Every structure is written in C-alpha cells, then in structure tokens.
Amino acid sequence: MSEPRNFDLDAYSPAQMALLAETAGVAKARLALPPLFVLAVLAGAFIAFGALFYAVTVTGSTLGDGPTRLLGGIAFSLGLVLVVIAGAELFTGNNLIVMAWAHGQVGSRALLRNWGVVYVGNLVGGVATALAVLLSGIATGPLADTVIAIAEAKAALPALEAFFRGVLCNALVCLAVWLCFAARDVSGKILAILFPTSAFIAIGFEHSVANMFLMPLGFMLAGTDPIWPTLVNLVPVTLGNIVGGGGLVALTYWFCYLRG
C-alpha cells in the first residue's frame, strides 16, 4: 500500500512569503529580453481589458456613487487576475523586486533594466489595445462619454495629487501581489487580488499602466492629441507608484523578514 500523501493547504506565512517574493524578483530580473518585453505587452493589454470592463460597468449605473465605484473596482480586478494567473510582467507589480534588490540578490542595473523594459512594454500594450478598441467601434455613445470623462479628470489632476494617488494606489496593488504569495491555489490568488484592487479603484487612486490605456483612448475619442496630457499625468503617477510599491510595501517587508 502506498504512503498517504500529505497536502498542506495552510497559507504560507509572511516570512515564507518574503522568501517566495525574493525568489520571484530574482527570476524576473534575470528574464531574457524578448520574453520580458512580450510579457510586458501582454500585461499592458490585460490591464486595459480590466480598465475597459470598469468603464462598461460604471456607464449608466443608477446604484449610487459608492456601490457603482465598488462594482467597477471588482470589474477592474480582471486585469490583475489575468496578469498574475495567466502570467505577464506588470511594472507596478514588479516594484516588489525591490525586496530582492535590498537583500543584495538583484543589482541596480538589473532592477532598472526590468523596470524600463516592462514600462515600455506595458505602454505598447495599453496604447495598442486603445487603438484596437477605437477601431472596433464599441466605444460609442454613453461608453465613449464615460471614457472621455475619465481621461479629462485624470489630465486635470494637479501633479502633487497625482503623485500621492499613485503612492496609495501601488501600495494596494503590491499588497495584492504580496498576498498572492500566501495562496497555494488559483482561487486563493484571485481572492487575494480582488479586495485590494477593487479598493484602489473605488477610492480613486492612480495606476500608471491603466492610464496608459484610458487616457489615450479617451482623448482619441474626443478627437484631441493624447500624447501631452498622458505624459503629464504619467510622470507623477509613475513616481508615486514606485514609492508606494517599492518603498511602502517592498522595503517594509524586506526590513521585517529579510534584513540581516
């Protein structure tokens, strides 16, 4: 008779999660350029799908502001679910590589290489998806009005507000990714993603990769040049995302579980 198999269904502890996150960070930093870029393009498209799902969900809602935001946040979670479960390289999530960097397992050059390639790939994926949506003809009527209003509101944000909304956003995004390291199965990872992601959307924080899709699409639908307003928004939001994910989450958990 064969020995009984032992299935450990308990979640990983935070100390174990830190080691898993560090190992994942090292693997991401060492990934060859072609698959890294392609996976980054995929992540940009995945987040765009989530952002479009959000826009469709909130368009015409009569549930009231709070419930509509919550429902839209749940819909947006599709993007990060696809990134984590299907496999893709997302700039905001990759801010967690700072844990491996702080522990000396990843060099500064490798860290910046990963961020640079992934950021450009995410931008290509987001803009390409915006163009595909525009050419598909589905973004018309009330949906087009929603996307235009979102883009204009983002463009009107003062830089300081955009920065801090970026900080708070990626603290929640990286916490979602961090919680995924505790899960042992797909359903656990999806649940780990759902609440932090829907929270940052419902509250109104700023995610650089989502803006790479929503702002170009919104301004193209409005018939205006999307480049300058998108760049003006992306600079402070991206810096805020780095501080929120790399500083508030990655460095904090490195200090608690990996330092020394």
Image (cartoon, rainbow, N blue to C red):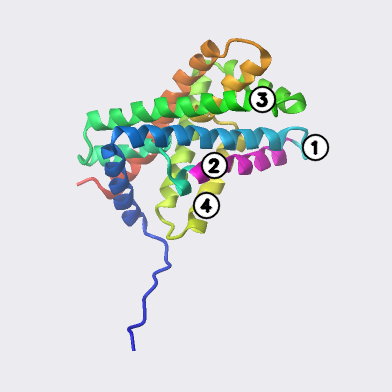
- Quadrant (top left, top right, bottom left, bottom right) of the N terminus: bottom left
> How far, Cα to Cα, is label 2 from label 4?
11 Å
Question: The residue under label 1 is which amino acid type?
Answer: Thr
Question: The residue under label 4 is which amino acid type?
Answer: Ile
Q: Which mark is residue 62?
A: 1
Name the residue: 21% across, 34% down.
107
Mark 2 or 4, nearer chain start: 4
> How far, Cα to Cα, is label 3 from label 1?
17 Å
**Which mark lies nearer to you, 2 or 4?**
4
206 or 123: which is nearer to us? 123
Q: State left or right for residue 215 relative to residue 145.
A: left
Query: Residue 175: horizontal and vertical position, in percent?
Result: 45, 44
Mark 2 or 3, nearer chain start: 3
Question: The residue under label 3 is which amino acid type?
Answer: Val
Residue pointed to by mark 3: 147
Magenta span of residues:
65-82
Mark 4 or 1, nearer chain start: 1
Other residues around mark 2 within 10 Å, as few (<14) / some (14–19) / many (≥20): many
Question: The residue under label 2 is which amino acid type?
Answer: Thr
Residue pointed to by mark 2: 197
Residue 207 appears anywhere in the view: no
Query: Residue 242: horizontal and vertical position, in percent?
Result: 39, 29
Q: Are marks 3 and 1 in contact (CB under 8 Å)?
A: no
Residue pointed to by mark 4: 190
Query: Residue 253: horizontal and vertical position, in percent?
Result: 34, 45
